[in-house]
């Protein structure tokens, strides 16, 4: 197995640390520690980089908090900003090296894969078999053996300077076990740890169809084959990984495979009940006005659930929750408060303005943008004859339409319009 060295010089470059900063800051610009660090960004980033180069950097003490996920409680470990930047810089270098070694059917926290890919894999193979083995490791991250993890990393990485940083992170919790939930590196380290199981399943047990997302695994085969696999997997996890399985059952596929938030059946897929319940609660909180977050954060929640739900049979759920109507109402309310400012969030399916000519539209909101030094208008509309009320967005640089929109009283929105074209000129009717 090839081992990789000469990584240190790539790790400590200014470009890598600046990229790490950007990734750390992403979607967190309002946080106090981010704003404070940003005041003297170049100096702070260079001081951090130099401390790493001199060998003075050590992982800071963790703060902890407990969060509840349905019936589970999870202990989350939180590091200061500088440690998160260093971990991003580290992952930038080592993640591509490890990712190319993982089997193609491990889906968790790997660029280009993810929950949907894992779900599609199950949907593809559920029609070929009658039985499935599903396993889950009890308290996976808190029970990771640090010695085994570090030994697995050393099989791939041989750069001594970089291994000092990695070792400091791996052993940052005392006791010999634990890979802290909340560390950026923990997602990658979890995959490195369970790659040992993946290789065993594929190359020694010769299981043809097997998929894994974090510590959730699914195996397909005949009932007799899976009985043999089940016992060998139990023994391997206990002896080689020093962990225990909390769930390891063989069942008929007609019961449905609960995996990655979906329940998979032959021919169709639905949302897991817990996922649907969280969806309903989030929508109810937004509709009632109890959700005090910004419009952009609310829209992100709705569109996140909507995007997740649209990949399975949830047509009736989406209609019942009136998601499109809720988005429209929130946008109209925000538009009347702030006006046609560039920062006004307008979401929807992007379509060409040419596809909307001579159609009856409900114009909900609009805003001014500057695209390639040209003043552009972004409009959010619904086609009046669309029963689902799908929200669309289109763009135009028409000065005529801009003047017409500016002439409409903001309190008159939403308004019914038709897009027309006369010669080369666009206008609203």
Image (spheres, rainbow, N blue to C red):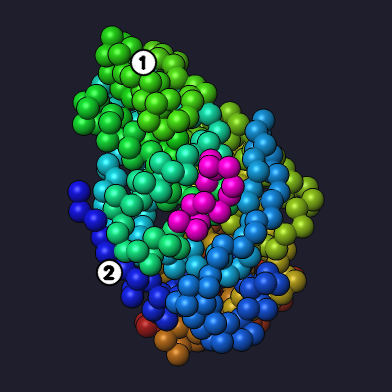
Q: In the rendered structure, which segment of residues is drawn in magenta?
A: 167-179
The location of residue 397, given as percent across then percent down, is 46, 82
**Label 1 Cα neighbours within 10 Å, binned few <14 / some 14-19 / many ≥20:** few
Circle 1/circle 2 CB separation < 8 Å: no
The location of residue 298, given as percent across then percent down, is 65, 56
Q: Is residue 157 left or right of residue 349?
A: left
Q: Which residue is mark 1?
A: 231
Question: Residue at position x 31%, y 68% from top?
Answer: 7
Question: Residue at position x 29%, y 53% from top?
Answer: 156
Question: Residue at position x 67%, y 62% from top?
Answer: 295
Count of numbered labels shown in the rendering: 2
Q: Residue 149: in sight, yes or no?
A: yes
Q: Is residue 322 left or right of residue 350?
A: right
Q: Which residue is mark 2?
A: 6
Question: Residue at position x 36%, y 46% from top?
Answer: 151
Badge 1 or badge 2: first in the primary sequence: 2
Farthest residue in the bottom direction? 373
In the image, residue 174 sits, relative to residue 33, either above or below, namely above
In the image, residue 207 sits, relative to residue 325, either above or below, namely above
The location of residue 148, given as percent across then percent down, is 41, 41
Judged by its main secondary structure, the magenta piece is loop
């Amino acid at each position: 197995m090839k081992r990789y060295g000469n990584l240190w010089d790539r790790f400590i470059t200014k470009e890598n640390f600046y990229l790490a900063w950007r990734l750390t800051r992403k979607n967190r610009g309002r946080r106090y520690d981010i704003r404070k660090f940003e005041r003297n960004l170049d100096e702070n980033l260079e001081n951090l980089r130099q401390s790493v180069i001199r060998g003075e950097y050590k992982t800071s003490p963790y703060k902890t908090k407990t969060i509840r996920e349905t019936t589970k409680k999870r202990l989350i470990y939180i590091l200061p900003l500088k440690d998160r930047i260093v971990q991003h810089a580290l992952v930038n270098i080592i993640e591509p090296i490890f990712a190319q070694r993982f089997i193609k059917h491990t889906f968790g926290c790997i660029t280009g894969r993810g929950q949907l890919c894992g779900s599609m894999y199950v949907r593809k193979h559920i029609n070929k078999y009658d039985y499935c083995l599903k396993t889950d490791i009890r308290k996976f991250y808190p029970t990771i053996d640090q010695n085994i993890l570090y030994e697995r990393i050393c099989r791939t990485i041989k750069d001594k300077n970089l291994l000092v940083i990695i070792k400091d992170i791996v052993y940052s919790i005392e006791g010999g076990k634990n890979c802290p939930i909340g560390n950026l590196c923990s997602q990658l380290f979890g995959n490195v740890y369970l790659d040992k199981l993946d290789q065993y399943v594929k190359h020694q047990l010769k299981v043809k169809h097997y998929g894994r997302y974090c510590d959730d695994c699914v195996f397909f085969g005949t009932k007799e084959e899976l009985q043999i696999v089940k016992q060998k997997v139990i023994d391997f996890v206990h002896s080689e990984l020093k962990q225990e399985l909390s769930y390891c059952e063989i069942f008929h596929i007609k019961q449905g495979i609960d995996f990655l938030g979906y329940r998979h059946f032959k021919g169709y897929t639905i949302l897991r009940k817990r996922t649907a319940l969280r969806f309903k609660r989030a929508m109810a909180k937004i509709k009632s006005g109890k959700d005090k977050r910004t419009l952009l954060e609310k829209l992100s929640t709705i569109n996140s659930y909507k995007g997740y739900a649209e990949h399975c049979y949830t047509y009736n759920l989406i209609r019942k929750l009136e998601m499109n109507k809720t988005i429209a109402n929130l946008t109209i309310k925000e538009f009347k408060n702030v006006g046609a400012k560039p920062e006004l969030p307008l979401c929807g399916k992007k379509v060409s303005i040419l596809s909307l000519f001579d159609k009856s539209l409900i114009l909900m909101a609009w805003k001014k943008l500057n695209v390639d030094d040209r003043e552009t208008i972004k409009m959010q509309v619904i086609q009046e004859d669309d029963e689902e009320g799908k929200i669309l967005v289109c763009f135009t640089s028409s000065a005529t339409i801009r003047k017409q929109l500016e002439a409409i009283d903001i309190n008159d929105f939403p308004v019914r319009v038709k897009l027309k074209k006369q010669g080369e000129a666009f206008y609203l009717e």
